[in-house]
Amino acid sequence: MQPQHLSRLAHQVRQSLPFYNRQHITPLRQAAKTVRSTVPGGQLLCSLEALAQAALAQESRHVERQARRAVRTQRPLAERLKTHLKRLGCRAIRERRLSTPAGWDALRSRDIGLDYDAPRRLWVISAEYKYHYSNRFGDWWVGASYLCGYEDGQYFAVRLPRTVTTLAEAEAWLQPRAVKLAEAAGHAVLRQGDFYLVPQRRATDDMAALDRSHRYDPQARTITHDQHGTLTLPEGQRYRAVRQRVQSSPRRRGQRGD
């Protein structure tokens, strides 16, 4: 075969192989040195052989990647949803600097309980498991539960007792006693962030419970927050600010029994 025909054949092979990549041929060029100087047209023949081997190797790797990707996408929708919500919840937990029990970050999605309300964009993630601290201290049952959600353009998380595993239980636990009594009496309770506004019969509003991030204007009767916006209190009704319940965590992060 003439050299010009070999050149044309090499060009056709390069155009027909979709997985051609020059970097895979470089290691194989060393093996063709002995043939290049002895066989007529050996250089082009060795290049074609190396090109074919590299293309086959790259094609096999491509098929393996496609197979692994297919296996990942074949997971049930419920499992993928739990993984996504767990990731969002853990990010909100870190941003709010909430305490987590030992071994929480290493939990897999299948080990976590989930109660999700899609229209309200609220969910509860919970887990209770046995964690091995050391050979000296042994294994301890630990766990936690968090109410997570998306509100006012941000994700939030609130720690709950680990016995609370549903949204109904979480909302009932977070409400203070004053809020429950007001709703039972038929009064409309307002809310902004972590604070409830309970109607009262006093002549003035009682906003002593508000923190610095919630700014109250007594003249305009508005409560302003950088993330939650501005809430205007209705005329003819006075309110008292009540903070939602908070799960106390006296232990340091990662201690036994957390």
Image (cartoon, rainbow, N blue to C red):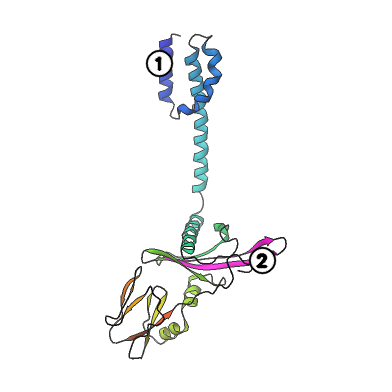
| Left or right position of 57 against 184 | right
In this picture, is 196 found above or below 141? below
Q: Quadrant of residue 244?
A: bottom left
Residue pictured at 67% horizontal, 61% vertical:
132
| Left or right position of 173 against 241 | right
What percent of the width, then of the height, locates residue 106? 58, 57
Tell me, yes or no, whether the highlighted magenta stretch contains residue 122: yes
Residue for badge 2 = 140
- The circle drawn on residue 8 is 1
Q: Earlier in the sequence, mark 1 or mark 2?
A: 1
Mark 1 is on which residue type?
Answer: Arg
Mark 2 is on which residue type?
Answer: Trp
Q: Residues within 10 Å of mark 2 (few under 14, many from 20)?
A: some
**Main SS category, magenta section:** strand
What percent of the width, then of the height, locates residue 6? 44, 13
What is the quadrant of the C terminus in the image? bottom right
Residue pictured at 33% horizontal, 78% vertical:
216
